[in-house]
Amino acid sequence: MPEKGNHEDLPQAPWGIISIKAQDEDFETPMQPITIMRNSLGREEGGSGVTLDKQAYENSVMYWDAHAAILAGQKPSGE
């Protein structure tokens, strides 16, 4: 592990990790609605250009309306 402040060079790869979607369900959880919306944007806008699947979007909204990715809680003390 490099020391703090010393950054190793990143490998030259045609891909990169954007997000890690942790889950504790025994099935694949739907993408979050905002991700579906952003992906539907054209490539020139930063999306993948995939056409929005209305049913997948609605399923995503229903799932994430009942599940929270982040819950509000006490702020860390910095220790």
Image: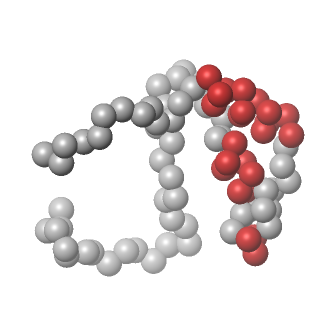
From the image, which quarter does the C terminus lie in? top left
Count of numbered badges drawn on the protein: 0
Query: Which residue is more in the foreground, 67 or 2?
Result: 67
Q: Quadrant of residue 41?
A: bottom right
Relative vertical location of residue 1 with respect to residue 23 in this rendering, above or below: below
Residue 3 spot, x, y in % from top left: 14, 68
Residue 22 spot, x, y in % from top left: 46, 37
| Image color mode | secondary structure
Residue located at (36% from left, 32% from top):
73
Relative vertical location of residue 16 with respect to residue 52 in this rendering, above or below: below
Relative vertical location of residue 3 with respect to residue 52 in this rendering, above or below: below
Residue located at (42% from left, 34% from top):
72
Residue 52 spot, x, y in % from top left: 84, 49
Left or right position of 79 against 75: left
Query: Which residue is more in the foreground, 66 or 12?
Result: 66
Left or right position of 54 against 12: right
From the image, which quarter does the N terminus lie in? bottom left
Residue located at (53% from left, 30% from top):
68
Query: Which residue is more in the foreground, 22 or 71?
Result: 71
